[in-house]
Amino acid sequence: MAMPKVGDTAPDFTEPTDDGSNLTLSNLRGNIVVLYFYPRAGTPSCTKEACSFRDNMIRLTGMGVKVIGVSTDSVKRQAGFKEKHALQFPLIADKEQKVVKLYNVLKTETGSATRSTFLIDREGVIRYVWPMVRVPGHVDEVIKKVEELKL
């Protein structure tokens, strides 16, 4: 299965978040969604990436963007990660690897996600993909792309 590409409708899912409630991607239609995948909650690069999104939330929400993080961690681990770093966006606990497989970002050797990001427009269409994210400057790239595409 190939990774979804620009122009594809974002594959829909319903999965538990850090607070135990379920999030359905298609329920976010009408919003711009940044769906970002990361390997493990609490590791140095994953923390830097999450905190970078956190530190830019006013700017992102001002642009109509909803940020959603996804890893194969448990609800409990996601909840602890969110609380420890005061993250203001939901973290999907994809313990069963359904979403990482749906987006073809599963690292088979570790069972975790490949660091990648999908920018989804208000109609649910993928407008940009970062398949191999480098954390430094990534959130700035996402903001620039949202502005550039005039979403």
Image: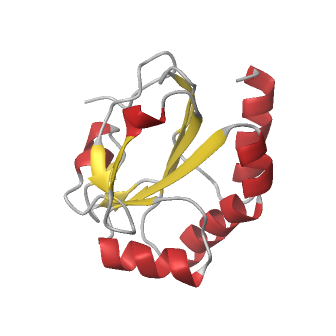
Where residue 120 sits, quadrant-wise, is top right
Quadrant (top left, top right, bottom left, bottom right) of the C terminus? top right
Quadrant (top left, top right, bottom left, bottom right) of the N terminus? top left
In the rendered image, the vertical position of residue 47 relative to residue 84, given as above or below: above
In the rendered image, the vertical position of residue 109 relative to residue 142, given as above or below: below
Q: Is residue 99 left or right of residue 37?
A: left
Q: Residue at x 73, y 60 (%)?
A: 136
Q: Is residue 94 left or right of residue 40?
A: left
Using the rendered image of the protein, determine whether residue 15 is visible from the camera's viewpoint: yes
Q: Residue at x 62, y 76 (%)?
A: 86
Q: How many marks do you count on the picture?
A: 0
Residue 39: image x %, image y %? 42, 64
Identify the image's colour scheme: rainbow, by chain, secondary structure or one colour.
secondary structure
Q: Residue at x 55, y 27 (%)?
A: 30
Q: Residue at x 63, y 63 (%)?
A: 49
Q: Is residue 143 left or right of residue 129?
A: right
Report the front residue among 132 and 118: 118
In the rendered image, the vertical position of residue 18 relative to residue 83, given as above or below: above
Where residue 62 sits, quadrant-wise, is top right
Residue 92: image x %, image y %? 38, 58
Residue 32: image x %, image y %? 60, 33
Residue 53: image x %, image y %? 67, 58
Where residue 87 sits, quadrant-wise, is bottom right
Using the rendered image of the protein, determine whether residue 42 is visible from the camera's viewpoint: no
Report the front residue among 103 and 82: 82
